[in-house]
Image (cartoon, rainbow, N blue to C red):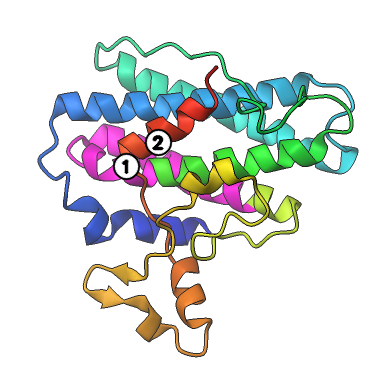
C-alpha cells in the first residue's frame, strides 16, 4: 500500500502543475495538511478517551492511530514554526457531521459509526497529502516531511478499511457503504489516465478499469479538501 502511494505521489501529472510554487504556497499547503491532522487527532483523542466504544480486539489499532496522529500533527506544526509561521489553530469538530451521524457521541455501541468516520478521515488524509506534494516539491525539507507521513497515511487507510471488511484500496469512485456526504472524498478516483498512459490498457485480465483505478490514488485540490473539512465544522 505504501509503495503504491509513493509511486503515485511522484508521477509527473501530480508534480508538474505546481513546479514554480513559492514560500507562500508552501506555507498554505502545510496549513491545509495541519487542518487534516487536527481532524484526525481530534477523532482519535475522543476515541481513546471513550469507555466501551472500541472492542478489545481493535484497541491496539486505535491507540496506534491516536499516537501516530499526534506525532504527524507535531511534525507539520514544526514545519510551520521553523519557517517562522504561526500555525492556524484547530477548529472544533462535529463528528455527527452536521447530523449525518445523528446521536454519535463516542459511546458504547457506536463502533460501526466510528469505523465509518475513520475510513472517511483516513482516505481524506491520503488524497490531501497527495494533492499538496507538487506544491511542496519546491521545499526539500517540507517535501521530505510530507512524504514520510504520506506513506504511513496509506497504511493507516488500508488498516481501517480492512477492519470494516473492505478492500485496502479504493475502487473507482466508490464510497462503499458510507453516507452520501462522504462522496467528495472519493470523487475523481475513477481516473484511469496516468500521464500519457491509459492504465486500463495495462490491466487486461487484472480487473481492467476497476484494477486501473485501484492501482493509483488521485490528489484532491485544496478547495476540495477545504469543502470536505467544512462538513465537520459546526
Q: Position of residue 156 (x, y in %)?
A: 60, 45
Q: Which residue does the image show at 29% across and 39% down from the upper left?
A: 143
**Foreground: 19 or 60?**
19
For the residues bearing labels 1 and 2, Cβ distance under 8 angstroms: yes
**Foreground: 96 or 36?**
96
Corner quadrant of residue 55: top right
Say which quadrant the C terminus sits in: top right
* Crowdedness near tag 2: few (<14), some (14–19) or many (≥20) residues, C-alpha within 10 Å: many
Res 221 label? 1
Stretch in magenta: 129-158
Q: Which residue does the image show at 26% across and 54% down from the upper left?
A: 14
Q: Position of residue 108 (x, y in %)?
A: 88, 28
Magenta: main secondary structure equals helix
Task: Based on the picture, tell me whether residue 132 belongs to the magenta stretch.
Answer: yes
**Foreground: 69 or 54?**
54
Q: Which residue does the image show at 67% across and 21% down from the upper left?
A: 45
* Crowdedness near tag 1: few (<14), some (14–19) or many (≥20) residues, C-alpha within 10 Å: some
SS class, disc 1: loop
Q: Which residue is mark 2?
A: 225
Query: Does residue 70 appear left or right of residue 28 in this picture?
Result: right
Q: CA distance from mark 1 to mark 2?
A: 6 Å
Residue 145 visible to the viewer: yes
Q: Position of residue 126 (x, y in %)?
A: 47, 45
Query: Does residue 110 appear left or right of residue 202 in this picture?
Result: right
Res 137 label? none
Farthest-out residue, bottom: 205
Task: Based on the picture, tell me whether residue 152 belongs to the magenta stretch.
Answer: yes
Q: Position of residue 227 (x, y in %)?
A: 41, 32
Amino acid at each position: 500500500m505504501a509503495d503504491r502511494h509513493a509511486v503515485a505521489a511522484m508521477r509527473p501529472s501530480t508534480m508538474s502543475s505546481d513546479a514554480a510554487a513559492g514560500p507562500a504556497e508552501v506555507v498554505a499547503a502545510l496549513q491545509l495538511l495541519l487542518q487534516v491532522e487536527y481532524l484526525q487527532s481530534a477523532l482519535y483523542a475522543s476515541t481513546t478517551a471513550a469507555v466501551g466504544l472500541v472492542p478489545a480486539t481493535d484497541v491496539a489499532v486505535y491507540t496506534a492511530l491516536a499516537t501516530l496522529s499526534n506525532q504527524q500533527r507535531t511534525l507539520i506544526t514544526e514545519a510551520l514554526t521553523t519557517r517562522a509561521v504561526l500555525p492556524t489553530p484547530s477548529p472544533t469538530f462535529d463528528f455527527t457531521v452536521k447530523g449525518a451521524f445523528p446521536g454519535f457521541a463516542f459511546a458504547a455501541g457506536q463502533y460501526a459509526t466510528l469505523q465509518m468516520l475513520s475510513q472517511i478521515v483516513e482516505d481524506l488524509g491520503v488524497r490531501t497529502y497527495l494533492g499538496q506534494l507538487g506544491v511542496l516539491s519546491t521545499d526539500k525539507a517540507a517535501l521530505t516531511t510530507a512524504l514520510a507521513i504520506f506513506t504511513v497515511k496509506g497504511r493507516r487507510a488500508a488498516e481501517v478499511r480492512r477492519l470494516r471488511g473492505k478492500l485496502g484500496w479504493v475502487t473507482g469512485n466508490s464510497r462503499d457503504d458510507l453516507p452520501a456526504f462522504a462522496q467528495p472524498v472519493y470523487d475523481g478516483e475513477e481516473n484511469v489516465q496516468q500521464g500519457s498512459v491509459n492504465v486500463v490498457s495495462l490491466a487486461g485480465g487484472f480487473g481492467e478499469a476497476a484494477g486501473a483505478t485501484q492501482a493509483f490514488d488521485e490528489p484532491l485540490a485544496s478547495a476540495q479538501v477545504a469543502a470536505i473539512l467544512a462538513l465537520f465544522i459546526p
